[in-house]
Image (cartoon, rainbow, N blue to C red):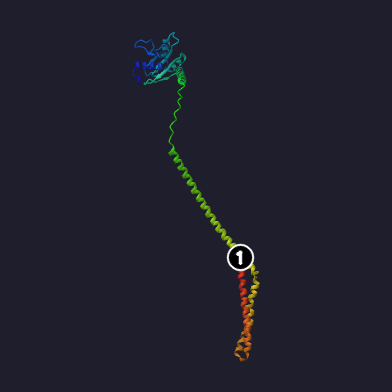
Amino acid sequence: MAFIASAREAEINAAARMREFGFGDALATPIGADGGVDVRSSRAIAEVKWKSAQAGRPEVQKLFGARGTKQHLQMFFFAAGGFSKGAVQYANESDVKLFTYDPNGVVTPANSVATTFVQRLEREKAAKDAADAAGRKKAEKEKTARARRERPKSTPPESPKPSPKVDDFAAKREQIKAELVAQEKRESKRRKNEAKRSKRDLIRNEKNARNHAQLVARQRRDQEIRSRGKVPSSRVIVALLWIPAVVLPLFMIPLTGGIVTGLLEAEGVQESIIGTVVAAVFIAIFVWLMRVIIRSLRKREIA
């Protein structure tokens, strides 16, 4: 029902709800004197109130009295405005199921008796649906088994049709392409790492070569120093320096004076020649000493 706009429509809606509850012969009573019952069934009766005020205890008691001695009849009360506290209490004690309804005809339990009744109906409906589903499944299995039994023996059983294969060539191609790209990245990274290692090894080898060359040069210098003898000390060098610096001039000055005098005097030519020879000897000794001093200084520098 789209919208309840009158008391008669409320009674028709209540009868429809009772049929949904399982009372298939529930009908609204004809218009006129109904004896306090608006909906009748062979197993239930109902009262309907179409007003905004709450239904009170006396109205619920009137429904209970209308049942009389027919104890097998279940009692339902539908009210748009709800029920008073006294009415709910009396209905729970007398097993009267109270329901409220909205203008669209949707009913809602209003006491514990009605709630228990609705829950029981829901459980029964769920069990019935499960049983129906099981029955349908069983019937389908029996039908399939019967069809197999009735199938001629000469006819080979139908083989299940193979499901069409999905053309996964494109997917495999993309997978192979992705693997190739990943492999190329790994190879590139490996080549870079090898280049870095080669560069480090080259730098290390060059450094080792330089160190080795320096070591060899140092060993050669040391060998040269050892081959030339011991490095003269500072005292020896000072002594060698004193010979040309002090001793040689002491001899050279008089000798030079004698040579000059002999050259000036005719009689002293022979003496001048001898003096010249002696001077040459002293100069040779002077040159030799200077070479020894320079070599000594080089040895000390190398050391």
Closer to us: 165 or 5: 165
Q: From the top left corner, tell me how far across and down residue 258 is, in percent.
A: 62, 87
Q: Is residue 139 visible?
A: no
Please give the name of the residue rendered at 42% of the width and 10% of the height, measured from the top-left corner.
67
Which type of secondary structure does the marked residue at label 1 adopt? helix
Residue that mark 1 sits on: 220
State the image coordinates of residue 19 (x, y, percent, origin top left). Answer: 40, 16
Above or below 112: residue 279: below
Image spot of residue 11 (x, y percent): 37, 15
Q: Is 18 placed left or right of 232 in the picture?
A: left
Q: How many numbered tags mark residues here?
A: 1
Q: Is residue 282 left or right of residue 30?
A: right
Q: Quadrant of the C terminus?
A: bottom right
Residue at the far top in the pictured view: 69
Q: Splitting the image into 4 quarters, where does residue 207 fall?
A: bottom right
State the residue lying farthest toward the bottom. 266
| Residue kind at label 1, given as amino acid type | Arg
Residue 291 occupies quadrant = bottom right
Q: In the picture shown, does residue 295 fall above or below 149?
A: below
Quadrant hosting residue 294: bottom right
**Which residue is more in the foreground, 158 or 100?**
158
Q: Nearer the viewer, residue 28 or 172?
A: 172
- Position of residue 302 relative to residue 193, above or below, is below
For the N terminus, the quadrant is: top left
**Which residue is depicted at the point 36% across and 16% down?**
12
Identified at 62% across, 82% down, the residue is: 280
